[in-house]
Image (spheres, rainbow, N blue to C red):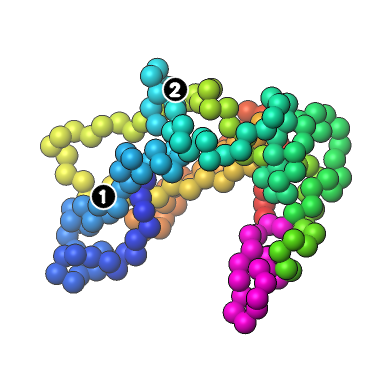
Amino acid sequence: MLFLSQRRTDSTYSGNTFDTIASSKAYDLAADCVLTEDQLRENGFPRPGKHKGQATICKTYQNHHLKPPNPDERYCSRCSKLFTITCYDRPGVDECNYHPKSTGFRRGCADNHHRCCQQVAGTPGCMYANYHVSHQVDYENLTGFVTTISRDEEYVCTRNDIFALDCEMCYTTEGLELTRVTVVDVNQKVVYDALVKPDNRIVDYNTT
């Protein structure tokens, strides 16, 4: 399930907290935060495609992302420069100069400042990376999609059926790829944690 964030103390059940209400009602409270199908599509979540294992992403969401002019070119997700993927065939040293955090207005200041280093917007980056990286996605080849198993109609879900999943991504020669996946239960106990080897060569571990 995919949830919008909501504090554990929020509740519509007689003013009680999430941790003290009936276990099944706690699940219902969390289930109310599940994104609708329209919200999933609008925010670019992969949805089941026409064939088993295939995924599709809303065309409207795709159009929000600028496409490079040529198949072997990418826009760097960090510095926005256009680069060719052939750069990965040779050793790179500090090729990308960027700010790891976006800009924002500070109280009492008229100019936008980067949140990472407090420099004014438009100044050279405060960090370097050996390669340019991208969030490039091949929208025509989204495979490996699976859905969760449907539960029995008589099964009553409880607080113990609530889990949270988080993924860590690294940059490879083909864009962002999964590197680690972690699952915790409703009590914040880790129930699954595993490193994942990407299909393509890693160019940046994205540790920042």
Q: Is residue 103 above or below residue 74?
A: below
The residue segment tinted magenta is 99-118
Q: Is residue 145 left or right of residue 74?
A: left
Where does the C terminus fall, quadrant-wise? bottom right
Whether residue 143 appears in magenta in the rendering, the answer is no
Task: List x then y, in percent, for residue 99.
Answer: 72, 58
Kindly identify the amino acid type of the residue bearing the numbered disc 1: Ala
Residue carrying label 1? 31
Left or right: residue 166 versus residue 199 is left
Image location (x, y in percent) of residue 173 = 70, 32
Q: Which residue is mark 2?
A: 54
Per the picture, the main secondary structure of the magenta-coloured stretch is loop
**Which residue is more in the foreground, 171 or 24?**
171
Mark sitting earlier along the chain (1/2)? 1
Q: Residue at x 68, y 57 (%)?
A: 100
Q: Is residue 88 visible?
A: no
